[in-house]
Image (tube, rainbow, N blue to C red):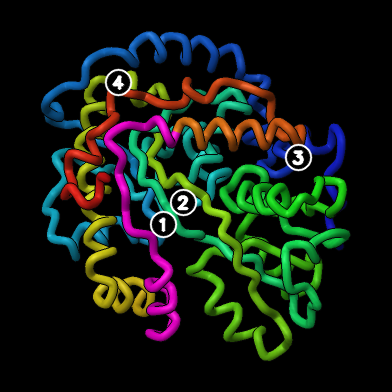
Amino acid sequence: MSSPPLSGVDRRLFLTSLLGAAAGVAGLSGCAESSAATSAKGASTAPLASKVPAGTSLKVASFQNSQQLQFRLAGLGELPFEVSSWVNVSAGPDVINAFRAKSLDLANNAGIPPIQAHYQGFDAKIVAINVTRRPNYVFATKPGSDIRTVDDFKGRRLAFSQGQAQGVVLLRALKKAGLAYDDVELVPLTSNQFLTALQSGQVDIAPLGNTQSPAYLAQYGPKGARVITTDVVDLLNLLWAPTSVLADRAKAAAVAAYIPYWAKGAVWAYEHPDIWNEEFYVKTQNLTLEQARSISELANKPYFPPRWDEAIRWEQETADLLAEGGFVKEFDVASLFDHRFEGIAARSVPAEYRR
């Protein structure tokens, strides 16, 4: 059964239905979270410890063990703290739920999940930025579709995930094409439902990551599916953590110590695509080597800006775009950035990756 399009107040209520009970209880726990957030915000200006205290541990997101594999292949050595669990989670809504449940301390996402967390009343901060200049997503059509450009999206059913990067990429593409929200049907789904929705014809279009599209085309291209490329980018790839974690001096020091590993790992993967293709995409993602190479050819060169001015501007544009559609309320995104960590990633990589 197809989900109904989003309009009016339904857009504002969409997130609750998307995230389920975990998001639904946010209002009940709002007072407690507000008190915790207040004390955490007061502690967020405390200087970072120069050394991670003994016994410190973090729960870190690592989708399908990709982060541990990257660190090992890059020869980065042991982290200076214990990782009590590597959590197999990546989608923004799932990360927010894991943060709420205190089963996750640090995650890697795009720019929209921190905005969504703020909208839900959950306090978290961005601690590292990797800017991407090339598109990470394409728009895939259902098999047998006659859609060939973004202009053809008018009147069609589009898979839309409000709390994930795919959602904002779609909204930016619509805006650039001069299409209003009411010109299309936004079907509320999470990204892990996109492929099934395309295959079944529940939606006409879904944003797919560059890592997903080769396999989709290999299977459904002969049946008339195609991808539509645009120059719309999702600028921010970031690390973020609950403010309560960052208010803990030992955990904040561990987060600061983790950032160089994250940045150096990304640089290594970019510089060693053949190894990464074979060890990750082929051996763990079951892609062919040809498919893996098509992904690495589209990979962004990592860029870790010493200052976050551009990232803040972009994040504000994203929040404003969501507010225009009634998906969130307007707010100043500067509050999402913990500037104690600004520059750590840039200082840990060669000059060509910070300018």
The structure residue drawn at horizontal position 66% and vertical position 23%, both measured from the top left corner, is 330
How many other residues sit within 10 Å of disc 2, few (<14), some (14-19) or many (≥20)? Answer: some
Residue 109, percent from left and from top: 46, 46
Tag 2 secondary structure:
loop
Q: Amino acid at mark 3?
A: Phe
Question: Which mark is drawn over residue 248?
Answer: 4
* Mark 1 / mark 3, whichever is N-terminal: 3
Q: Start and end of the magenta stretch? A: 285-311
Residue 285, percent from left and from top: 42, 73
The residue where tag 3 is placed is 14
Magenta stretch holds residue 167: no
Q: Are marks 1 and 2 in contact (CB under 8 Å)?
A: yes
Residue 221, percent from left and from top: 65, 85
The structure residue drawn at horizontal position 72% and vertical position 36%, both measured from the top left corner, is 16
Q: Amino acid at mark 2?
A: Val
Q: Amino acid at mark 1?
A: Phe
